[in-house]
Image (spheres, rainbow, N blue to C red):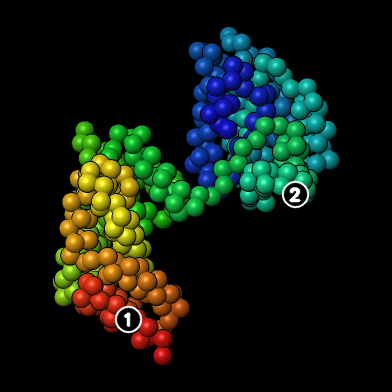
């Protein structure tokens, strides 16, 4: 919706942006603010206000004033939830402004409204329920959501965060493989603001280099204790259980990384599972697109699939689910669970249904 607003010749007079993804809220508000104020070369009619310490009356007074040395006035009020107001005093003021907003002013509010979480999706799925939820909100948000243009930026799901990281890398001029994007997220969580900071650091680190490799990512977002996750994947791809266990033991001896190991290996084996069918495409770029990796990684994945075989890949995904459940709910030693996981995946013939299984821990 923000793209649609930016395409308009004139923006709506009052816009409210909110949601759990505060980075996206700020970026959307900044884009609207820049678009609305582009005619104000002198900067005499643009204001960015912090809601903390402001009153609604003062904000609306600025909004009603005529622009100076420009044909438009633009106001962005950040942290609008901090504005000092009461319904008894503020409602008449806000209602009056929304009924007849200043034609030459674009007023942008950005805010955190936890009680409104999910209202954007609800508006699409069930408009009647959305209206009830809007009316139940406290002032001034109930009024704004009923009488102004608004956009919610809800919390992203894991898959959406991965896609966001990839697009952010592209915007920065970086080519980063899906496994490396997953690794960055695993190390730093799904908070977009923190991820953005790490990607900016990565861009600064690599300079003019376009193709980001494992060493670059580890140098910026990893630490010496976690450098072995890709070594572990390679050892598994070589179907080498003794080396894989040795690497996993070294990782777990310095830090609690068992859930990170499970997350990364699940991503790895999911990619290999997709490759079972995609390998028949006989075109590196087509295969890369089908399994979600950079083209230069295709040969490595093809070799791993050849070493492991389709049955072991399928078994690995089952055992990884069991291992994750055990790590979250069982008092068993994490190292023992990870070691048994690797044995369950790697110790039986690639074409056999029989193998060691984590089911032994079910007794």
Which residue is outermost to the bottom? Answer: 363
Q: Secondary structure at mark 1?
A: loop
Residue at left offset 21%, top offset 66%: 308
Q: From this viewpoint, is residue 84 visible?
A: no
Tag 2, which secondary structure?
helix
Q: Is residue 201 left or right of residue 1?
A: left
Quarter of the picture containing the N terminus is top right
Give residue 151's quadrant in the image: top right
> Of 127 and 102, which appears nearest the observer?
127
In-image side of 335 versus 53 (left or right): left
Tell me which residue sits at (27%, 73%) in the image.
345
Q: Residue at left 67%, top 16%?
A: 104
Residue 123 visible here: yes
Q: Residue at x 36, y 34 (%)?
A: 171
Residue labelled with disc 1: 357
Q: Which residue is mark 2?
A: 129
Q: Position of residue 221 (x, y in %)?
A: 29, 52
Crowding at dot 1, Cα within 10 Å, few <14 / some 14-19 / many 20+, comes out as some
| Residue 82 image point, x, y percent | 65, 43
Mark 2, residues whose alpha carbon is within 10 Å: few (<14), some, or many (≥20)? few
């Amino acid at each position: 919706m923000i793209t649609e607003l930016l395409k308009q010749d004139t923006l709506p007079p009052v816009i409210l942006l909110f949601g759990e993804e505060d980075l996206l809220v700020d970026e959307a508000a900044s884009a609207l603010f820049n678009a609305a104020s582009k005619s104000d070369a002198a900067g005499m009619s643009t204001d960015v206000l912090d809601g903390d310490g402001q009153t609604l009356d003062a904000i609306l007074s600025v909004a009603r004033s005529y622009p100076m040395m420009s044909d438009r006035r633009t106001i962005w009020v950040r942290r609008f939830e901090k504005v000092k107001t009461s319904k008894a005093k503020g409602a008449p003021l806000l209602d009056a402004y929304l009924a007849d907003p200043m034609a030459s002013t674009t007023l942008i509010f950005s805010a955190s409204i936890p009680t409104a979480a999910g209202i954007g999706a609800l508006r699409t799925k069930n408009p009647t329920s959305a209206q009830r939820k809007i009316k139940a909100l406290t002032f001034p948000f109930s009024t704004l959501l009923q009488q102004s243009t608004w956009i919610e930026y809800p919390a992203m799901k894991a898959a959406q965060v991965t896609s966001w990281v990839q697009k952010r890398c592209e915007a920065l001029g970086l080519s980063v493989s899906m496994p490396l994007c997953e690794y960055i997220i695993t190390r730093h969580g799904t908070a977009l603001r923190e991820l953005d900071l790490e990607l900016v650091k990565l861009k600064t680190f690599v300079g003019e280099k376009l193709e980001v490799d494992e060493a670059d990512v580890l140098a910026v977002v990893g630490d010496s204790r976690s450098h072995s996750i890709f070594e572990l994947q390679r050892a598994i791809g070589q179907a080498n259980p003794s080396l894989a266990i040795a690497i996993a033991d070294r990782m777990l001896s310095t830090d609690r990384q068992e859930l990170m190991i499970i997350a990364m290996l699940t991503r790895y084996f999911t990619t290999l599972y997709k490759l079972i069918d995609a390998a028949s495409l006989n075109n590196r770029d087509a295969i890369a697109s089908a399994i979600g990796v950079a083209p230069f990684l295709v040969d490595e994945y093809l070799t791993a699939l050849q070493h492991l075989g389709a049955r072991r890949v399928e078994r690995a995904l089952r055992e990884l689910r069991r291992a994750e459940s055990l790590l979250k709910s069982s008092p068993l030693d994490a190292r023992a669970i990870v070691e048994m996981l690797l044995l369950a995946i790697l110790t039986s013939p690639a074409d056999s249904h029989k193998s060691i299984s984590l089911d032994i821990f079910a007794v």
